């Protein structure tokens, strides 16, 4: 079927997944990515009909149920490539809901739900590296809007807080990709939200191939104490040769566990990283925090290739995962459900939209864990996660294909970091 459809679809068209037909569509690129200097538009495949639109988006009226529904920003990657793990909430127009004011959670709300430190100097003296693919040309200016809106300290190139480099540390940046630009905005803004005193190093790889991303990783780990990676792809036997990129004395590595439930994905499954899963923050009608549950799409599972780190396999709750000596993911979690999504500002147009978005995905939880670790000022590895005095909120309700249980599980790992210490 796909070959037949592909033969009649013009080159460069984008296939956009309509909410009721996601199983029969393929997203092949992002609106706004450069193709011969022109912005792409949508092609929607529905059962029994093909609807084509070019040059500019057509605001098709979606099913009523689509309002407030989230969609993945990055399509499923080919072998050897990674996808970003961010989801964006859609509006009634059938496109990502971009607004002139924040609609997602604010930093003060998230920090209150977890009891995180609120000092504007939290994380001072530390550097958090964000590794992502492609260029976000408005990363610094968007961070400035975010910081001003939420009363956070300025983080700019001029004051030495922010730096953007390519995968080898240079300033010749890769091409822009609008989907990854939204990912980058999420990562740097929420790392800054949790650790406003820390420096931010954005390392942009030339592409989303593992080769390029790991080149960026190798630069990041020698220039920062905490490295966050909000991307991943399917596991393969090749990953065993990639694990060395996530080793550096004194450096903590964090990876989003994925946004599709089970099975595990890479590099979340590397025993050298902290795999960060996803939860849902539940609030009352008046905005009071009520509870935290497992997010149904949070990534997790047993690795097909990687062995568990010694500290994980020795942990008393590991056997409950039934991974038979293999790496179990995630290790820990934080808010990632788009339903309790965070506010992100992005002026690089994504699917014709720009402004404030409500977003989620484990792309949110990974930079927040990296930032919280920077605030603590400790090296966070498997030994620390499974043997330290971190105060966890054990998540015992929810299911991502595996149930959230008392103790360790493949839904949220050990749970969420709560409290102001360490």
Image: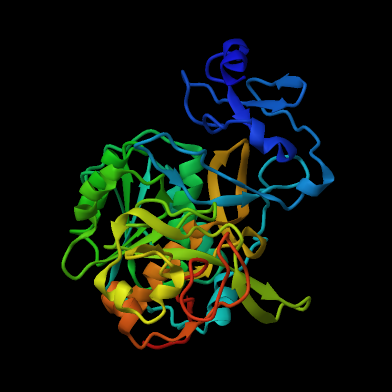
Q: Residue at x 51, y 55 (%)?
A: 262
Q: Quadrant of the N terminus?
A: top right
Q: Quadrant of residue 4?
A: top right
Q: Residue furthest top?
A: 8
Q: Residue at x 73, y 53 (%)?
A: 68
- Can you say whether 150 is above or below 141 in the image? below
The one of 297 and 122 positioned closer to us in this rendering: 297
Whether residue 115 sits left or right of residue 81 in the image: it is right
Q: Quadrant of residue 220?
A: bottom left
Q: Quadrant of the C terminus?
A: bottom left
**Can residue 55 be seen in this snapshot?**
yes
- Can you say whether 330 is above or below 17 in the image? below
**Total label count?**
0
**Can residue 161 be seen in this snapshot?**
no
Residue 168 horizontal/vertical position (percent): 21, 44
Whether residue 244 sits left or right of residue 93 in the image: it is left
Residue 78 horizontal/vertical position (percent): 42, 34
Whether residue 338 sits left or right of residue 274 in the image: it is right
Q: Residue at x 37, y 68 (%)?
A: 370
Residue 88 horizontal/vertical position (percent): 61, 50
Q: Residue at x 58, y 11 (%)?
A: 7
Q: How is the image coloured?
A: rainbow
Q: Quadrant of residue 268?
A: bottom left
- Can you say whether 61 is above or below 122 in the image? above
- Can you say whether 361 is above or below 234 in the image? below
Residue 342 horizontal/vertical position (percent): 58, 63
């Amino acid at each position: 079927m796909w070959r037949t459809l592909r033969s009649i679809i013009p080159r460069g068209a984008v296939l956009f997944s309509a909410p009721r037909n996601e199983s029969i569509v393929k997203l092949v690129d992002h609106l706004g990515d450069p193709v011969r200097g022109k912005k792409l538009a949508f092609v929607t495949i529905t059962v029994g009909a093909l609807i084509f639109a070019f040059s500019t988006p057509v605001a098709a009226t979606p099913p009523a149920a689509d309002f407030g529904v989230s969609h993945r920003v990055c399509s499923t990657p080919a072998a050897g490539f990674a996808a970003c793990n961010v989801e964006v909430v859609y509006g009634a127009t059938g496109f990502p809901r971009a607004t002139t004011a924040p609609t997602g959670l604010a930093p003060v709300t998230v920090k209150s739900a977890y009891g995180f430190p609120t000092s504007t100097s939290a994380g001072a003296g530390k550097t958090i590296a964000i590794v992502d693919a492609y260029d976000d040309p408005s990363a610094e200016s968007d961070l400035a809007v975010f910081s001003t809106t939420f009363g956070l300290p300025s983080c700019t190139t001029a004051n030495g807080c922010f730096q953007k480099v390519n995968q080898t540390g240079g300033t010749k940046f890769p091409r822009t990709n609008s989907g990854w630009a939204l990912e980058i905005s999420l990562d740097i803004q929420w790392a800054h939200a949790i650790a406003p005193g820390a420096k931010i190093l954005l390392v942009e790889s030339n592409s989303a191939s593992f080769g390029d991303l790991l080149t960026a990783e190798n630069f990041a780990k020698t220039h920062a104490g905490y490295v966050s990676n909000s991307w991943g792809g399917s596991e393969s036997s090749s990953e065993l040769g990639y694990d060395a990129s996530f080793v550096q004395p004194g450096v903590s590595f964090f990876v989003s566990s994925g946004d599709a439930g089970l099975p595990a994905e890479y590099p979340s499954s590397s025993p050298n990283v902290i795999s960060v899963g996803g939860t849902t923050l539940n609030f009352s009608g008046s905005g009071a925090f009520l509870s935290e549950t497992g997010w149904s799409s949070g990534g997790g599972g047993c690795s097909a290739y990687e062995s568990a780190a010694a500290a994980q396999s020795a942990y008393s709750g590991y056997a409950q995962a039934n991974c038979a000596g293999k790496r179990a993911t995630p290790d820990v979690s934080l808010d990632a459900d788009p339903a309790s999504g965070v506010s992100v500002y992005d002026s690089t147009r994504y699917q014709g939209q720009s402004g404030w978005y409500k977003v989620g995905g484990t792309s949110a939880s990974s930079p927040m864990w990296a930032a919280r670790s920077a605030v603590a000022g400790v090296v966070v590895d498997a030994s620390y996660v499974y043997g330290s005095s971190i105060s966890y909120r054990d998540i015992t309700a929810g299911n991502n294909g595996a149930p959230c249980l008392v103790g360790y599980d493949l839904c949220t790992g050990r749970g969420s970091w709560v409290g102001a210490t360490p």
